[in-house]
Image (cartoon, rainbow, N blue to C red):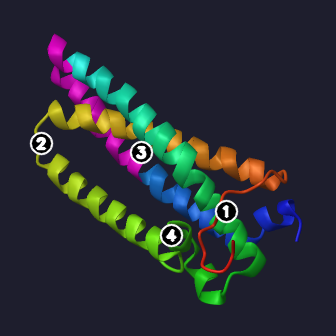
Amino acid sequence: MTPRAAATHPAALWGVFGWLTLLSQAVYRLTALALEAVDHGMSGLEWGLFVFSIVFMSYSEGYKGFHLQVAPRVVARAIYLARSGRLYERLLAPLFCMSLFRATRKRLIISWCLYASIITVVILVRMLEQPWRGIVDAGVVVGLALGTASVLYHYVRAASGRPLASSEVPGDD
């Protein structure tokens, strides 16, 4: 199967765009909360922390996390689904692309711990009052938006035949 055919296969599309939908929903919901902090009337220190949050999360979450690690693997797993995925993997493609099942033992542990940590942090950040919640959310919004762009970037590269990252599916590499 050619890279273009694999990238446009329904399973690959469902995996990538289902996953992107989850990210986009988070960006949409958190943007309002981040902007609420701006409306709150922030002090100089709070503005400094707002900018720091955006810069820090752009680099750590957007670039180091998504662009270099998550996005290439999401796309590689989506392409794997198109080429040789099982029916249940294709039906659950967004979860498969998140490496929540049928991955190497190390990847499964990392993925489940990562998502559990994210859920814990989300719960804790919800307890913060404005502008502190908005300061954190502003950085997360930018990081997730960069992550969304990164997945699209890697998807286009894969569709044009560029080499893929490891899918981390046992027996695939």
Q: Is residue 122 magenta?
A: no
**Residues tagged 3 and 4 counted as in contact (Cβ below 8 A):** no
**Label 2 sits on residue:** 128
Question: Predominant secondary structure in magenta?
Answer: helix
Amino acid type indicated by mark 3: Val
Question: Quick check: 50 above or below 117?
Answer: above
Point out residue 28 in the picture as x, y percentages from the top left corner: 41, 45
User: First in sequence: mark 2 or mark 3?
Assistant: 3
Q: Which residues are magenta?
A: 26-46
Which residue occupies the foreground of this view, 143 or 23?
143
Task: Report the residue at 70% width, 72% height from top.
Answer: 80
In the shown orientation, is residue 60 left or right of residue 121? right
User: First in sequence: mark 1 or mark 4?
Assistant: 1
User: What kind of element bears circle 1?
Assistant: helix
- Spatial separation of the CA atoms under disc 1 and disc 3: 24 Å
Which residue occupies the foreground of this view, 69 or 16?
69
**Label 4 sits on residue:** 99
User: First in sequence: mark 2 or mark 1?
Assistant: 1
User: What kind of element bears circle 3?
Assistant: helix
Amino acid type indicated by mark 4: Ser
Q: Count residues near mark 1 (Cα–Cα under 10 Å), then give few for <14, some for 14-19, many for 20+.
A: many
**Label 3 sits on residue:** 27
Point out residue 25 in the picture as x, y percentages from the top left corner: 43, 53
Amino acid type indicated by mark 1: Ala
**Label 1 sits on residue:** 76
Amino acid type indicated by mark 2: Leu
User: First in sequence: mark 3 or mark 4?
Assistant: 3
Task: Report the residue at 76% width, 54% height from top.
Answer: 158
